[in-house]
Amino acid sequence: MKAIVKAAAGQGLVVRDVPKPACGPADVLIKVHHAGVCGTDLHIADWDEWAQGRIKPPLVLGHEFAGEIVEVGADARGEFETGQLVTAEGHIVCGHCLQCRTGNGHICAKTRIIGVDRAGAFTEFIAMPAGNVMRLDGIPTEIGAIMDPMGNAFHTVLTAEIPGSVVLVLGCGPIGCFAVGIARAAGAKAVVAVDVNPKRLALAATMGATKALQPGPEVRQAVMELSEGNGADVVCEMSGAVSALHDAFALVRNGGRVQLLGIPKGDIPVNWATEIIFKGITIYGVIGRKMYETWNQMQRFLRSGVFDPRPVITHRFPLERIDDALAAIRSGDAGKVIIEIGH
Ligand SMILES: NC(=O)c1ccc[n+]([C@@H]2O[C@H](COP(=O)([O-])OP(=O)(O)OC[C@H]3O[C@@H](n4cnc5c(N)ncnc54)[C@H](O)[C@@H]3O)[C@@H](O)[C@H]2O)c1
Ligand SMILES: [Zn+2]
Ligand SMILES: [Zn+2]
């Protein structure tokens, strides 16, 4: 079967044939229909420092996908049947550690990620542990394929108190744009979206941002006007930019909440006293999706129709055109980029 592979240490990816995986007794074998491409795949293609330390080639890439069940292992029968459309949580956790046993599998230190630590989904078939597989039950596979990054946004937004709140979203990449729509659907009073890139601000506006602004004094003005001078109840930092992190602390209200998803490079000096302690704020670090609370929330928002992520999908490519898909992401103008595989 055809796959997008990191063949060896160094730049680039190749499309080549790999063996079809076997379906273990506790697995579900899935024929991939759609897969999402993201910054992680770019890091692996470019063979940056993170990739050099983590990836062991040869490796089939891809951690965001959805497709159709073609085989169910003996121990996985009951919940799953062939022909069902499904997606899967790509973080495979140990199940035995303190975090896993207290419902916090998203911070399991033994997490192994498909397309990073084991074979991924940029191919025709993938075998997944049944415990990670989620039935779509009416959600199209194109949306199922982006539930991983969308789940990052759901986790970020819905772990704060949103109804009636003024929400500030810093960074309107695909995840920030999802967050804008989710905050609106969850009943925010207003959502102020900030990005340096006008194309991404336009996408944030489409997703329902009350104001979509470039960083600068207008952002403070908008937040203060909408919040009777208090500041944002909730700030979602989704850019990883140093200045945005300081904006988050400056614009959150006293006693408000800062949700940190964006991953900054290296150390950042912070004035702990004035930016955090004296404001009495709560900071929450977001990693992955809560298993499986976030997935359940996501299914309810999608099935009820209160949230539609489709405007964020801007590009679709066949598997052979992975280099074009990566170029679209590299341009910084794309929303979510999808690979169409076998549907
Ligand atoms: N914690 C997690 O589990 C997790 C998972 C996936 C991605 N991430 C991180 O989340 C972030 C968002 O992911 P994405 O795929 O949407 O990334 P992205 O790179 O597409 O989006 C980041 C956006 O921030 C904007 N930006 C840059 N400087 C800014 C500034 N000063 N103010 C406001 N916006 C600014 C960029 O123009 C861009 O649109 C990234 O940092 C990514 O590494 C974290
Ligand atoms: Zn991803
Ligand atoms: Zn664990």
Image (spheres, rainbow, N blue to C red):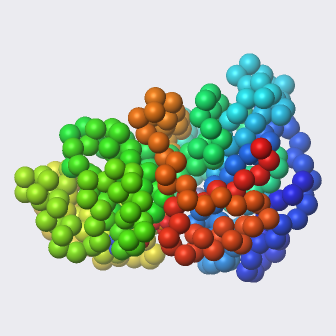
Indicate the position of residue 123 as horizontal and vertical percent values. Answer: 80, 54
Q: Which quadrant does the C terminus fall into?
A: top right
Indicate the position of residue 212 as horizontal and vertical percent values. Answer: 30, 62
Q: Is residue 208 visible?
A: yes
Q: Residue at x 53, y 66 (%)?
A: 334
Indicate the position of residue 11 as horizontal and vertical percent values. Answer: 73, 80
In this rendering, the answer to whether 206 lies above or below 44 is above
Q: Which quadrant does the N terminus fall into?
A: bottom right
- Looking at the image, the residue that sits furthest to the top is 78
Decide which of 150, 139 is in the foreground and name it. 139
Could you say which quadrant of the image residue 205 lies in?
bottom left
Q: Is residue 102 visible?
A: no
Q: Residue at x 7, y 52 (%)?
A: 228
Could you say which quadrant of the image residue 278 lies in?
bottom left
- Looking at the image, the residue that sits furthest to the left is 228
Question: In screen coordinates, is 47 left or right of 150?
Answer: right
Q: Residue at x 77, y 60 (%)?
A: 319
Question: In screen coordinates, is 195 left or right of 287?
Answer: left
Question: In screen coordinates, is 238 left or right of 22?
Answer: left
Question: In screen coordinates, is 34 left or right of 164?
Answer: right
- The mark tally for this picture is 0
Q: Residue at x 61, y 42 (%)?
A: 144
Indicate the position of residue 277 as horizontal and vertical percent values. Answer: 18, 61
* Ligand 1 occupies quarter: bottom left
Could you say which quadrant of the image residue 285 lies in?
bottom left
In this rendering, the answer to whether 155 lies above or below 225 is above
In this rendering, the answer to whether 152 lies above or below 134 is below
